[in-house]
Image: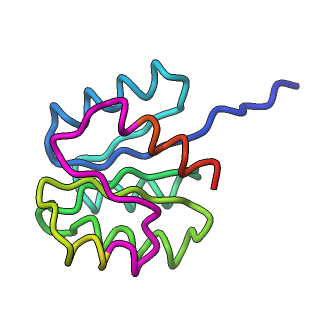
Amino acid sequence: MAVDSKLRILVVDDEDDLRNILSDVLEKTGYEIKSASNGEEAINLLKKNRFDLTLLDIQMPNLNGIEVLKYIKQHFPATKSIMLTGYADLKHAMEAKEFGAVDFISKPYQLEEILSTIDRALKE
């Protein structure tokens, strides 16, 4: 019986191009990827799947990344989260850390930076 040992990552970003590129790169790197274009979609996926890590865009319409992060910490405390944002400011970073984010990456980001941050987060 084969055991699926691929690490599962949920990519949540309302910017289609960024979400698709990131998902493709992570899949090619060997992760199992699901993606969501908004917070509600992310929570629905979280209810049905187990994830090792989530990449959450902070600024999204309706349900933002911080709200999704709060949900994850409440219901799936073992799932790690890295916040992505085009609005790199201390307030968001502090808030994200307060609710359990393991790291914070500013857009535009380098793919190498994301991959090394994911690698580091999953080893913690």
Does residue 43 appear to the left or right of 85 in the view shown? Answer: right
Query: Which residue reaches farthest right?
Result: 1
| Residue 108 in sight from this viewpoint | yes
Q: How is the image coloured?
A: rainbow
Q: In the figure, 59 relative to 98: above or below? A: above
- Does 89 sit above or below residue 23? below
Q: Which residues are magenta?
A: 96-114
Please report the residue visible at 48 percent of the width from the left and 43 percent of the height from the top.
118
Is residue 59 depicted above or below 36 in this figure?
Answer: below
Q: Residue 102, position in %: x, y?
A: 47, 63
Answer with left or right where residue 104 lies relative to residue 28.
left
Q: Is residue 94 magenta?
A: no
Q: Position of residue 77 (x, y in %)?
A: 58, 71
Quarter placement of the C terminus: bottom right
Identify the residue at image location x=15%, y=68%.
89
Does residue 34 appear left or right of residue 110 in this picture?
right
* Residue 19, horizontal then vertical, whole percent: 25, 37
Q: Quadrant of residue 21?
A: top left
Name the foreground residue: 32 vs 25: 25
Q: What is the x, y in percent for residue 103?
A: 40, 59
Q: Nearer the viewer, residue 84 or 4?
A: 84
Q: Residue at x 61, y 38 (%)?
A: 7
Count of numbered labels shown in the rendering: 0
Q: Quadrant of the N terminus?
A: top right
